[in-house]
Image: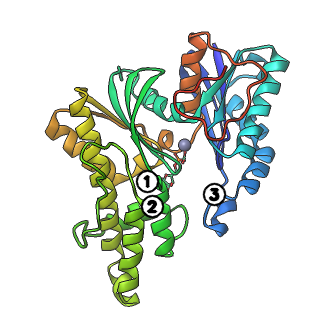
Amino acid sequence: MRLLAIETSCDETAAAVLDNGTLLSNIVYSQLKLHQPFGGVVPEIASRAHLQTVIPTIQKALAEAGIQKDDVEAIAVTFGPGLVGSLLVGLNVAKAMAYALNIPLIGVNHLEGHIFANRLDHPDLEPPAMVLLVSGGHTILLLLEDWGRYRVLGQTIDDAAGEAFDKVAKMLTLGYPGGPIIDKLAREGNPEFYRFPRAWLDDKSYNFSFSGLKTAVLNYLKSQKKEFIREHLTDICASFQAAVTDVLLEKTVRAANEFEVSKIALTGGVARNSYIRAQFEKRANQEGLQLFVPSPAYCTDNAAMIGAAGQFYLEAGQHADFSLDAVPNLGLNTRPA
Ligand code: KG4
Ligand code: ZN
């Protein structure tokens, strides 16, 4: 069964082809350069860019998979959460193709896509597992009870982890997106240079908060001389990154222990972070937990992960109908009607 997957929820136009779950192609057209001058994603620019690139991206994915559009037997598409104007572009193309080719349409929750990303590299990942989804828009700790069954234990009450990276990078005038830049600079810095606050919230909470940390960094920067900041830029990045990592790591490990699961899975753009990956690896080894992390290309937004989730629902016979609408604030446990 050849499945075409389409993802346009934010600023990446992406298409992938899977054959019975085996990935044949995975194309991502990044709009990064269009948004960089604005220091963040501009929704209208994103929708228009999707409109221009979505068909060429699909054509490229089909060509790389060595198939024609008529060979596609099912279509999976992200219907939320995300920017409404962006979602509508991919959704409309997917519907038109499914209608014209008379094939099943599968609506995929973007967050579920991120969870399924781990399955692309680790088909052996069997639930239950504790999943930490950390991206630019979300920070969610969830128990993967089974594929398709999630128990959300906590999430951010303010900024997402990736958002914190991006905002702190902006304060340091490092550019956008901040995550990869801070990651790189922090490799040369001392994570114990300055102790930024860790927001544990209350003892039992699995929620996260990063806005206090962001303010603490801002106040710290205001209190220091420009030369000092320049001289210790890598140390400041490393110290901020350590504060984010500590909270993510402690809460995830505590949840794994409380719910007695032996597996931890990271996913989302922030899971590309080299320090986070290394710290989780180290701690997982100490605790006897098995750690799963997708390869970097499957962490950030892509269509392969949407295809992996789509394949699951295709096999389960859960198809969407043509009334499927974009849902910008779609929650994790919502399936299309
Ligand atoms: O998953 P993603 O591509 O999009 C969303 O669904 O949000 O994640 C993008 C986020 C951005 O905030 C970006 O700064 C962050 O992931 N990111 C990183 C790294 N690479 C990307 N954050 C920390 N370290 C990285 N290496
Ligand atoms: Zn995402």
Q: Which residue is mark 3?
A: 32
Q: Earlier in the sequence, mark 2 or mark 3?
A: 3
Above or below 57: residue 44: below
- Ligand 1 neighbours mark 3 (CB distance < 8 Å): no
Q: Which mark is residue 95?
A: none
Task: Tell me the quarter of the picture where residue 95 sits.
Answer: top right
Q: CA distance from mark 3 to mark 1?
A: 19 Å
Q: CA distance from mark 1 to mark 2?
A: 7 Å
Q: Which mark is residue 165?
A: 2
Mark 1 Cα shell of 10 Å, populated few (<14), some (14-19), many (≥20): many
Task: Tell me the quarter of the picture where residue 3 sits.
Answer: top right
Q: Nearer the viewer, mark 2 or mark 3?
A: 2
User: Mark 1–mark 2 contact, CB under 8 Å?
Assistant: yes
The residue under the point 37% across, 45% down is 207
Point out residue 267 in the picture as x, y percentages from the top left corner: 43, 39
Q: Amino acid at mark 3?
A: Leu
User: From this viewpoint, is residue 326 visible?
Assistant: yes
Between residue 194 and residue 154, name the one nearer to us: 154
Between residue 203 and residue 19, name the one nearer to us: 203
Q: Nearer the viewer, mark 3 or mark 1?
A: 1
The residue under the point 66% across, 67% down is 38
The residue under the point 80% across, 47% down is 52
Q: Quadrant of the N terminus?
A: top right
- Ligand 1 neighbours mark 1 (CB distance < 8 Å): yes
Mark 2 Cα shell of 10 Å, populated few (<14), some (14-19), many (≥20): many
For label 3, the SS is helix
